[in-house]
Image: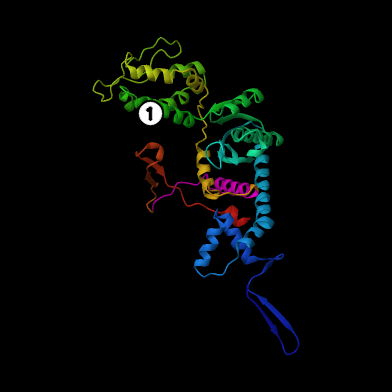
Amino acid sequence: MLTVTQECMCGMTRRWSSQPFVGSYLAGNLDISAGILYSGSIPSKALRFLEQMNVKAITNRTYFNHQQAILYPSILGVWRVYQSKYFQTMRSNNMSICIGGDGRCDTPGHSAKYCSYTILDVNYMVVADIQLIQSNEVKSSCHMEKEGLVRCIGKLKEQGLEVGELVTDRHPQITKFVREEMPNTKHFFDVWHVSKGLKKKLVKISSLKDCASLQPWIQSITNHLYWVPVSTPSGEEDVIVEKWLSHITNKHDHSRPKFPKCLHGPIPDDRQRQWLDPSSKVFVELEKCIGSTRVKNDIKKLSPGPQTAALEGFHSVLNHFAPKMIGFSYEGMLSRLILAALHFNENMQRPQAETKEGKKRFSVVFPKVKAGDYSLKEVKVPCTYGMFLNS
């Protein structure tokens, strides 16, 4: 900061500073610290960049002082106000809510220090609550995800909200908790999580000797997994299972009472993909996989409607604000979680971008999960950052 002191011959003294003060803090320096944190940047890299440009700036120590004294309390205050407005709106609707939940550990494996559990209101596409659990708060790191859900549900109950439907992954501890402690809540599994695990098993089977003929069927089987619950909005578990066990052997009439016949039309005889022989090794291995008790029980609980795909998108946003390669303090991690949630909620409902001619814009992407295949994706209008600017 530059300070100029003027002394007049009449004895009057005037002092000018290049930065105004916010309390006892220099406003410009505080803006630098806020900009680093609110943009999800890493302070050491951001300040090193300014140093390389020969731009005089604050030190790391000054940044951390600002962060602890001003920025963390400000972020928590904005989040409390935001949550309060959301809870008030939900209470005024006088209806149970449908939420999706998923956890995210700061490191893979069983050595994670933190696990953040996020619940998303799938009807309004709003992150309703985030809980951060540290591994020393529970028996072991593998218990953190369940503890996160327990705290999120407790928060909703404190606010007088009832959970009508809950969509999660297949976490056994969560399944048991919901079954025993939330008997009035319908618990569904997210289809993508089940599909991902099933696809790995199918790929493994197709790599066995004399089982390569399964490879062309893998995508169809996983697609069928999505169709089964969506085509059964009533949620009848027996119907869902019977639909799942139909056909890849060119048999379309079944002895099952609730699904006696396939719903598709005639299939051309000149189709390139070959039907599987019921007596072949590949079919036997496939039947053991998709007909297992575990898989059938999972199929019964697949969500016919809401999914947790938006939470995967939120985790991508979170990777920007809190990269897994960087270690944060508890307050630092919690604040960056909140920043990610505020940014996600502000931009989740962005409209699709248009060309100058008014046509909707799309882009071709090659997602990792498709192993080289492409998908068509909507191009959204640029993100906004009003929540940070207004705070």
The residue at 66%/53% (across/down) is 72
Say if 312 sits above or below 273 in the image: below
Task: Give the quadrant of residue 175.
Answer: top right
Where does residue 32 sit, x and y in percent of width and height?
59, 62
Where does residue 310 sit, x and y in percent of width and height?
51, 39
Q: Quadrant of the C terminus?
A: bottom right
The residue at 71%/87% (across/down) is 8
Say if 353 sits above or below 245 in the image: below
The residue at 68%/40% (across/down) is 88
| Residue that protrudes farthest toward the front in the picture | 111
Please state the extent of the stretch shown in magenta in the rendering.
Answer: 331-355
Q: Is residue 305 left or right of residue 1?
A: left
Where does residue 336 sit, x and y in percent of width and height?
59, 49
Q: Which residue is mark 1?
A: 203
The residue at 64%/62% (across/down) is 62
Q: Is residue 334 magenta?
A: yes
> Magenta part mainly helix, strand or loop?
helix
Q: Quadrant of the N terminus?
A: bottom right
- As shown in the figure, which amino acid type bears the numbered disc 1? Val
| Residue that protrudes farthest toward the bottom in the picture | 9
- 136, 348: nearer the viewer: 136
| Residue that protrudes farthest toward the right in the picture | 11
Mark 1 Cα-neighbour bin, 10 Å: few <14, some 14–19, many ≥20: some
Task: Give the quadrant of residue 171.
Answer: top right
- 286, 347: nearer the viewer: 286
Q: How many marks?
A: 1
* SS at circle 1: helix
Where does residue 234 sit, x and y in percent of width and height?
52, 21
Q: Is residue 136 left or right of residue 42?
A: right
- 90, 309: nearer the viewer: 309
Q: Is residue 376 magenta?
A: no
